[in-house]
Image (spheres, coloured by chain):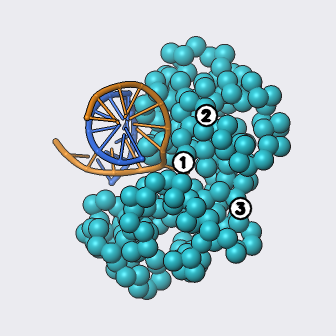
Chain colours: A cyan, B orange, C blue
Amino acid sequence: MPRSLYRIYRRLYACHGPQHWWPGDTRFEIMVGAVLTQNAAWTNVERAIANLRTRGALTPEAIVAAHPRRLAAWLRPSGYFNVKARRLRALCRWIIDEGGLRRLARRDTETLRRDLLAVHGIGPETADDILLYAFDRPVFVIDAYTRRLFRRLGLIDGNEDYETLRALFERGLARCRDKVALFNEYHALIVRHAKEICRVRPRCGHCCLARSCPVGDQRTEDRGQCA
DNA sequence: AACCAGGAGACAT
DNA sequence: ATGTCTCATGGT
């Protein structure tokens, strides 16, 4: 497995090209997006973020100061708006209490990860999104797509717990040089691969990721250009 | 008209 | 430790 991880990356990159992730300008905006995109389509997240921007609420202070009902209303398009309003507030509260992002950025990765996970609404994937894309830390993000793809490639079972898979991927890519850039692009490519192929050609000869893909859960041999 | 989307927490077992 | 339920909008 270890050696094949990088080869699969090369195929994905050759197939889809650079993805320029994370979509978001500031560090804070990336963190907001990471929470709002939980089990939600990114297009819907963009609307919610646009709402925050027009209301001048793209700062921790503004979000904490906003009335809960009003904040939830801004988040409506991204779904689970009541839940996400609380989570976003908790995240902002934490950022402020810890002395701001400048200061948090100086923390070492393990500490930062542990503290992020202690914030209400920040689970392992969201924490790693933030670590990788907002703080440029070499952390490999595991999501449902990652499980499906590598299960279908026959490289994992798919039911391993989060930390097990993260360790597996990080160790499998341990000898690569620019890990932040690599992990950044890798995760983005996995998501891109999931979105693109099966939508455009439901019966593509490649490994498909959509749940409804005709290839189903068969462990597909990767043939051709895409993994 | 179901099904799904860049999950996490609460709660029961 | 491991399952199950809930949260909710918008696109296909």
When the figure is inspected, residue A90 is found, relative to residue A122, above or below; the finding is: above
Label 2 vs label 3: CA separation?
Answer: 23 Å
Identify the mark nearer the N-term, 2 or 3: 2
- Give the percent coordinates (x, y) of residue A130: 65, 46
**Badge 3 local density, few (<14 within 10 Å), some, or many (20+)?**
some
Tell me the element at label 1. Answer: helix
What amino acid is at disc 1? Glu
Mark 2 — residue?
A: A118
What amino acid is at disc 3? Val
Q: Chain of mark 2?
A: A
Closer to us: C4 or A105 = C4
What amino acid is at disc 2? Ala
Tell me the element at label 3. Answer: helix
Mark 3 — residue?
A: A180
Identify the mark nearer the N-term, 2 or 1: 2
Q: Chain of mark 3?
A: A
